[in-house]
Image (tube, rainbow, N blue to C red):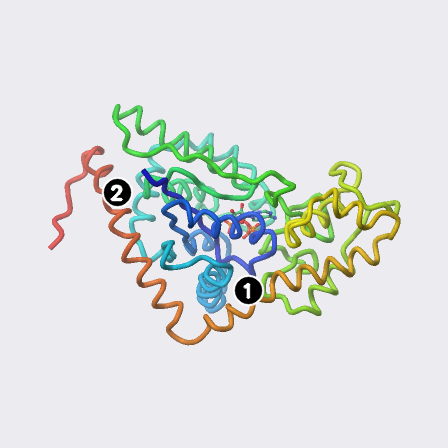
Amino acid sequence: MVKRVFSGVQPSGSLTIGNYLGALRNFTKLQHEAECLFCVVDLHALTVPQDPKELYQRTLDVARIFVACGIDPKLATVFIQSHVPAHAEMSWLLECSSYVGELRRMTQYKEKSSKQEVVTAGLFTYPVLMAADILLYQTDEVPVGEDQKQHLELARDIAIRVNNRFDEEIFKVPEPYIPPKIAGGRIMNLQDPTEKMSKSAENPRGNIAILDPPDAIQQKIRSAVTDSGREIYYDEENKAAISNLMVIYSLCSDQSLEEIQERYAGSGYGQFKKDLAEVVVETLRPIQERFEELSRPGVIEAILAQGRKKAEPLALATLERFQDRLGLLPLLRS
Ligand code: AQP
């Protein structure tokens, strides 16, 4: 049996190299060994205020970035969450099997709600929608960055709870696939290495966006904060800033942290940053070129229509089974 993989990305900002190294790069590897569904989770983005025109454009752009990064629509299913209404419907059903206490414990909710003037109910229940996304597809494995670990544990808890209640496997219990920090699981902000790089961050100077032009990348890396001392070596605790830059360098150049350390022994931060900028520009260049090609009218729309057609029957099969077990009357589809 080929395993099934599901993951989603919110169109809540311009995707960063953190999203690429922590998630998208792994998507492209997994598509060769598993049945993959990759989703632009636009409903999640609505949990905080969005400008409708920007959301529309970003949703298309995230789908283009998926494909530009190497997701092949012939191998993997690429689609938009709101195009499969079963996600919202399943979310409601699962909310009725989730507890306020467990949602209150979500650290991302605490962080994000503290930054909002008003906190929507959607931001609070967002992890249940994420559980619905995953469980609808009887997912075996979910490739995500480290920040999503707690949400995945919740999805597992909900699946186990429902299965136990009905004494039957209604939902496959998904496994996380989280790369360790040195493999990109948690890329940090260039201006504050104690904070995760986030696409919706207020100050874009701490982010490298996948679509940033070369001069912006060079500028951001030049002004990235560094640690005291001039030595370049990996030490997450005492040299958090340089360690983060080394991880980006290592993943973009396929060189180990040891090789990088040896190469820059005694040379100081200047040359290291200059070379890092070059390595990042060259990693993103082919992605940016493919993104341009995918921006021709109709190209991504056709991929998304095909993706929806493949995803929807899978989602409906799970939804209808769960509705039936809950005692809801079947919908007679004509
Ligand atoms: N800094 C990061 N390092 C490694 N992986 C990361 N991911 C996000 N940031 C990093 C992973 O990217 C995927 C997309 O995540 P999402 O769209 O669901 O939102 P998120 O996890 O909340 O990511 P952001 O970039 O921080 O978005 P905003 O700013 O909107 O909250 C996930 O697999 C995530 O783990």
Q: At 66% across and 54% down in the image, what residue appears? A: 253
Q: Residues within 10 Å of mark 2 (few under 14, many from 20)?
A: many
Residue 23 picture location, percent across and down: 53, 49
Which residue is found at the position 33% from the left and 48% from the top?
87
Q: Helix, strand, or loop for circle 2? A: helix
In this view, 22 is above or below 98: below
Disc 2 within 8 angstroms of ligand 1 (CB) = no
Foreground: 38 or 203? Answer: 38
Q: Which of label 2 and label 1 is nearer to you?
A: 1
Label ID, residue 331? none
- The residue depicted at 28 percent of the width and 29 percent of the height is 169
Which quarter of the rendered picture does the N terminus lie within?
Answer: top left
At label 1, counting other C-alpha atoms closer than 10 Å, the crowd grade (few under 14, some 14-19, many 20 or more) is some
Left or right: where 274 falls relative to 11: right
Front residue of this view, candidates 134 and 302: 302
Where is residue 259 shown, x and y percent of the image?
74, 46
Residue for point 15% across, 47% down: 331
Q: Is residue 194 above or below residue 279?
A: above
The three-letter code of the residue at mark 1 reads: Ile
Residue 222, located in which quarter of the rendered image?
A: bottom right
Q: Nearer the viewer, residue 241 or 44?
A: 241
Name the image quarter holding residue 257. top right
Amino acid type, callout 2:
Leu
How many numbered circles are shown? Answer: 2
Give the alpha-carbon distance from disc 2 to disc 1, as whole Å.
36 Å
Residue 197: percent from left, percent from top: 64, 50
Residue 292, position in %: x, y? Answer: 51, 72
Mark carried by residue 287: 1
Q: Secondary structure at mark 1?
A: helix
Residue tagged 2: 319
